Structure formats: C-alpha cells, structure tokens
Amino acid sequence: MYDYIYNRLYAGNDAVARSYALRLFIHFMGDIHQPFHTEARFTDTYPDGDKGANAFELPYHYEADELHAVWDKGVYTLRGNIARPFTSETYSKFQTKTIDPYMTAS
C-alpha cells in the first residue's frame, strides 16, 4: 500500500506517504475489530439487511443514534472528535482515552 501511495499519490513526499499509509493501516485494523462490518441483520423490516447495524436505530446519545455508531464510539467512551494534527497536548489527551487504566507498567 505504501508503494502505491508514494508512487501514485504523493510522489517524492515520503513523510506524507508514510503518514497516509499508517493512517490507512490504523483504520483497517479498527475495521477488523468492528463486528458490524462482517454481518447484517435481516428482518421483515430490512429484507436486504440493516447495513451492518447502520439501520439499527437507537435513541440519540453522545453523538450516536444507531448501533454501528455506538460501537465506533467505543460504546460511548470515545465520543467527540480528536483535534488534528496531533500536538503534545492533544496526543496526551488522546492517550488517556486509549490506554487501559487497569494496566500498569512493570
């Protein structure tokens, strides 16, 4: 993927190509852990499926109004957008949301 990005999209700009490839990798790894990307609920209401829980409506809460979005938001723990590009401050804030508080360094 990096070769394609570097040679076709950002020729000569290694830093941007690496950043883009890394962001795609992170996105794809997240997709692997999103169970609704591999299934669809078929009912009388949704004979063609619920589009990976995108059509499974829920009451609006913390920026999510359907089941797929609730999962994407870390079951409401990852609500709100993270400011980009990362700065020291925004990266530190992001780390507090992604590191398990029960894990300690040995």
Image (cartoon, grey):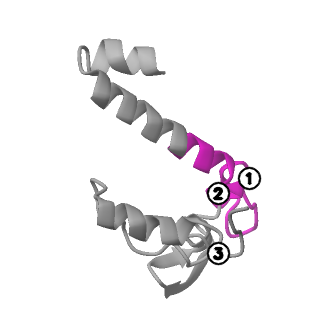
- Residue under numbered circle 2: 52
Please provide the residue range marked out in magenta: 27-52
Image spot of residue 45 (x, y percent): 68, 70
Q: Earlier in the sequence, mark 2 or mark 1?
A: 1
Query: What residue is drawn where x is 72% and y is 56%?
Result: 35
Q: Are marks 2 and 1 in contact (CB under 8 Å)?
A: yes
- Residue under numbered circle 1: 39
Image spot of residue 36 (x, y percent): 68, 57
* Residue 43 belongs to the span the image colors magenta: yes
* Residue 44 belongs to the span the image colors magenta: yes
- Mark 1 closeness class: few <14, some 14–19, many ≥20 residues within 10 Å: few
Image spot of residue 26 (x, y percent): 53, 43
Please state which of residues 96 and 104 is positioned toward the viewer in this rendering.
104
Q: Earlier in the sequence, mark 1 or mark 3?
A: 1
Residue 61 drawn above or below residue 34:
below
Q: How far apart in space, not on screen, are marks 3 and 2 (Cα)? A: 30 Å
> Which tag is nearer the camera, tag 1 or tag 3?
3
